[in-house]
Each structure stands twice: as C-alpha cells, then as structure tokens.
Image (cartoon, grey):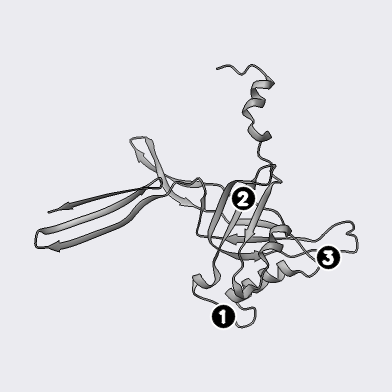
Amino acid sequence: MAITGVDAFKSKLVGGGARANMFQVTCNFPAFAGGNTELASFMIKAAQLPGSTIGMIEVPFRGRKLKIAGDRTFDSWTITVLNDTNMAVRSAFEAWMNAINNHIANTGKSNPAEYQTDMQIDQLDKAGNSVKSYTFRGAFPTMVSSIDMSYDTNDAIEEFTVELNYQYWTSNSTPSSGLVGAKFGIGSAGASIAASINLGGVTIGAGITI
C-alpha cells in the first residue's frame, strides 16, 4: 500500500511517538547500602533501554560459511545521576561497592544473593503511564565515575555515571518458555513420565506410562 501523505503517517504515529525524556528508573539498593529508591528515581537523569545481542557461529563448508545462532550476551548498563547536595545517591552506590570489595581489607560479600538486586526502567507515555518495562536481573555496580571540580564551572549541577552489570534482562513483553517441571516414577503398573512446558504463558502438560 502506498504512503499517500503526512496525514497517513500521522495516523500511524500513535501517541505522537515514544519520547526519550519520558522514563523512570527503579533502583533497588540492598539494605546495607542505605539508598533511597524514590530519591534515585528523580536523580537518575539518563539511562538506556537495553539492546539485544546474539552471537554468530560460522561453520566453513566447501568454500562457503554456514551461519548459525550462537550465545546471547548482555552489555553493561550505564546510568547518569544528578548529584544532590547531600550526595545521598552517590554515597549509597559507594557503600554498595565497598560491601562487595572493601577499600582497605580487600574483603567483601561473596554470596551473590547478598549484593545483587533487580533494577527496572520504564518507558512512559505523555500521560506518565508505563508502556514498556525492562527488568535487569541480578544487577550490581562495577564503576562509579569521578566528578571533576573546577573554579571555572558555573551554572551547572554535578553529575556522575554508574556502570552496572547484571545476569540478564526481561521485559513485560518477553515471552517465557522452557521446561517447567518433570517427574519420573516407578509403580506397580510400570514406569511413568510426566512433564509440563510453558509456552508463551500457557502451561501444557503431558504424561505417559510404560
């Protein structure tokens, strides 16, 4: 179908298009870091919706290369934070990192469950409603940037960046699939196998008796 003009384009640009400045980050600090989630959501002035990368394997065959899907990788996630006068958000990230690896003793928490938390970023519409959300599972900070100080700097609020790494991300539109559960048993009637699989939120079960 031919695109006839700007009116046709306008009818497809629902809601006026997604805006990069309409977002909210939910930063769930571990209890020991003492961070304020609400304050951080206001102070985080920039972040990214995550990308999606799957590696590729090339298999040579008679002068050609067969390309097949490899493994998924997840890039680090960087946020930019406005520095409040109490430096509360920066101090919370510093305390978080210090608990992972102490500045002096080179000791820290070794159980990932103790220092990893879930983070979330929401794309908002012009009414402030979430239209897309991403959750970063098992996130923790690996870098808090320096802040440059100078007599020459006027009319500016300090900013710093935090780099976080995580295990993987999910979204409110990412379908879940995989093996949910399986059972194997032997009784007087013989052996039985039962399994259930989740496909797109629908659980399908099956069982056989041998």
Q: Amino acid at mark 1?
A: Thr
Give the quarter of the figure containing the C terminus: bottom left
- In the image, residue 199 sits, relative to residue 43, either above or below, namely above
Disc on the earlier residue, 3 or 1? 1
Disc on the earlier residue, 2 or 3? 2
Residue located at (69% from left, 43% from top): 127
Q: Circle 3 is placed at which residue position?
A: 149
Point out residue 14 in the picture as x, y percentages from the top left corner.
Answer: 63, 32
Q: Tags 3 and 1 in contact by the CB under 8 Å rule?
A: no
Is 46 on the left-hand or right-hand side of 63?
right
Is 137 on the left-hand or right-hand side of 183?
right
- In the image, residue 117 sits, relative to residue 177, either above or below, namely below
Point out residue 99 in the picture as x, y percentages from the top left corner.
Answer: 60, 76
Tell me how far mark 2 sits from mark 3, CA to CA: 32 Å
Q: Amino acid at mark 3?
A: Met
Badge 1 element: loop
Residue 160 occupies quadrant: bottom right
- In the image, residue 29 sits, relative to residue 3, either above or below, namely below
Q: Amino acid at mark 2?
A: Asp
Point out residue 72 in the picture as x, y percentages from the top left corner.
Answer: 46, 50
Is 72 on the left-hand or right-hand side of 184?
right
Badge 2 element: strand
Q: Circle 2 is placed at which residue position?
A: 122
Residue located at (90% from left, 60% from top): 152
Q: Which mark is residue 168?
A: none
Disc on the earlier residue, 1 or 2? 1
**Residue sitting farthest toward the bottom:** 105
The local crowd at label 3, few if under 14, some if 14 to 19, many if 20 or more residues have their Cα within 10 Å, is: few
The local crowd at label 2, few if under 14, some if 14 to 19, many if 20 or more residues have their Cα within 10 Å, is: some
Q: Circle 1 is placed at which residue position?
A: 107
